[in-house]
Image (tube, grey):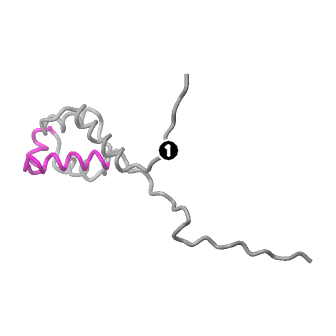
Amino acid sequence: MADILAFPSTPRSERPRQSDPEPLWRHLLGDQLRRRRHDREETLSETADKAGVSPQYLSEVERGLKEPSSEMIAAIAGALDTSLVELTSDVADSLRSTAPSRGAFALAA
């Protein structure tokens, strides 16, 4: 008969954790839009009117429930006196700061 060997148990605090999934683009976009609207002290209705969308639609975009087209994003960005490039850059910066580190990679030619 074979002997049974016990493996040392790794304390739970030292075990690798399953990392949280990366945030969705639409959630970070919504956060940026809401922050910009609040910075301007505008209501949903005021910004929605300027953008040519309904307040309900803008609310859903801000809460990350809608995946707006690039035309809609541009219209809302314009209503908030920002450019699509600036808004996209800020969303990308937010994504970089919240995304788990994937390690560094280098390519050699």
Query: At which x and y percent is residue 2?
Result: 89, 75
Residue 79 located left or right of residue 21: left
Query: At which x and y percent is residue 62?
Result: 24, 50
Q: Nearer the viewer, residue 99 or 55?
A: 99
Residue 16 located left or right of residue 41: right
- Residue located beneath label 1 in the image: 103
Q: Residue at 31%, 50% (x, y): give it.
A: 27
Q: Residue at 61%, 70% (x, y): give it.
A: 10
Amino acid tagged 1: Gly
Q: Is residue 25 above or below residue 13?
A: above
Q: Is residue 4 above or below residue 58?
A: below
Query: In the image as oriented, which residue stretches furthest toward the top?
Result: 109
Q: Is residue 72 magenta?
A: no
Question: Predominant secondary structure in magenta?
Answer: helix
Residue 17 located left or right of residue 10: left
Quadrant of the rendered image containing residue 93: top left
Q: Quadrant of the C terminus?
A: top right
Quadrant of the rendered image containing residue 72: top left
Q: Is residue 36 magenta?
A: yes
Query: At which x and y percent is residue 65?
Result: 31, 51
Q: Is residue 66 above or below residue 105?
A: below
Q: Nearer the viewer, residue 1 or 14?
A: 14
Residue 2 located left or right of residue 96: right
Boundaries of the magenta span: 27-52
Query: At which x and y percent is residue 64?
Result: 30, 51
Q: Is residue 91 above or below residue 1?
A: above
Quadrant of the rendered image containing residue 48: top left
Dot 1 crowding, Cα within 10 Å, few <14, some 14–19, many 20+ = few
